[in-house]
Image (cartoon, helix red, strand yellow):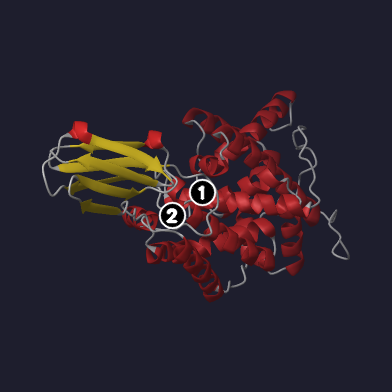
Amino acid sequence: MNSHSKENKMECKELLLQISDYIDGTLHPRKQAELEKHLAVCPRCRTFVNTLKTTISLCQSLYEVPAPIHRHLHNILRHELEIHRVNVSIGVLRPPFIELTELKKQIRISIELPGIKQKDITLRVAPDHIEISGFNEKIEGTYYLNEISSGAFSRKFKLPILVNSSRVQATLKNGILKLTILKN
Amino acid sequence: MKVKPETGNKDKASDMTLVKRAKNRDFSAFEELVTRYEIKVYNLAYKMLGSQEDAEDVLQDIFLSAFKSIDEFKEISSFSTWIYRIATNACLMKLRSKKSQTISLDDKPNSLTAEITDWSQNSATLLDRKELREIMEKAIKSLPKMNRAVFILRDVEGLSNSEASKVLNISIAAVKSRLHRARLYLREKLSNYFSGRNEFSLKGK
């Protein structure tokens, strides 16, 4: 009854394909039942399954990992991270520096915007204040020194007198935006 | 026999809290993450690379790389999966550069007919044999890189099929198939050992 008939041989081949799932317990319950039925009558397959299970558990207990030198790793990382910290600006964006002077007939304003293109600047003149905003693009790369502000910036400042926005002249030259506002 | 996953009982919420702080350049938060995962990562590296020196080397690279790319960590998967992915990739790259001798697992299914002796016994006794240990390590080392990675992640480190597929960025079906091949191959090597057909000479290579 337990002779290794041709039918059994085919079942053995099929079992082989499903053996990993069987061992992991992820086989469909019906397939699992079929498989176990086969195992009950097939010593060869039983041996195969047992030896496969042993192989896996041997590999699990195989490794005696030599103790790593944790302290060494932390020192190295701390050292590398320290360098990184000093070089990387910690997300603080410096607002543009401004000079505001009142003259006899005009208000003169200078705004430092080094490296910023005119198209990236937005200027809003209200009767009693000015708002300057814009964007400084950052190139992708590995930064070793990263002190120049980047990203979006925005600053609002009050004017000492009321002005008319139509009387504003603006020129961007040498990285400085110069505004001249004629007094009313 | 169900292989039990070895996932530590990490409080996932606090891993994510640390990640958020690390993204804001809180270095102590990142260091804490390192402390939490360095043993796991080291173990994985040691098993993948087979040498302490290589494992120590790659450990630095892994955590430095993690720090530099922390902003790209989308927090969709767990930090554990993410660091395992960085670690596995680093190990695979190191293996590629070492050009180790690996065999190819053919498509031919294993023959069942050769097997009669059941050598499955209590593994504790089996492992006392230093020779057996060396054979097994050699056998694992001779697995093709991806099969080795899958085998170590799944069967040795206890990751699930789903976690392994995320770590390796391959389908679950690919994980299963590579695992299957690796397991059968290793079983065959052990089988040869027990029946005296030792292919891995312990002298020299």
The percent coordinates of residue A122 (x first, y second) are 30, 36
Residue B6 in sight from this viewpoint? yes
Which numbered mark, 2 or 1, is in the foreground of this view?
A: 2
Q: Residues within 10 Å of mark 1 (few under 14, many from 20)?
A: many
Placement of A77 over or under A115, stated as above or below:
below
Q: Is residue B5 above or below residue A168?
A: below
Q: In the image, what residue type sits under mark 1?
A: Leu
- Of residues B155 and B57, the one nearer the viewer is B57
- Residue that mark 1 sits on: B159
Residue that label 2 marks: A148
Residue at 35% x, 39% y is: A171
Residue at the image position 51 percent from the left and 44 percent from the top? A139
Q: Name the residue at 52% across, 71% down.
A: A79
Q: Please tell me the numbered disc located at residue A55.
A: none
Q: Looking at the picture, which amino acid does disc 2 mark?
A: Ile
Front-lying residue, B119 or B22: B22
In terms of secondary structure, where does tag 2 sit? loop
Where residue A87 appears, as percent x and y from the top left, is 48, 62
Tag count in the figure? 2
State which chain disc 2 sits on: A
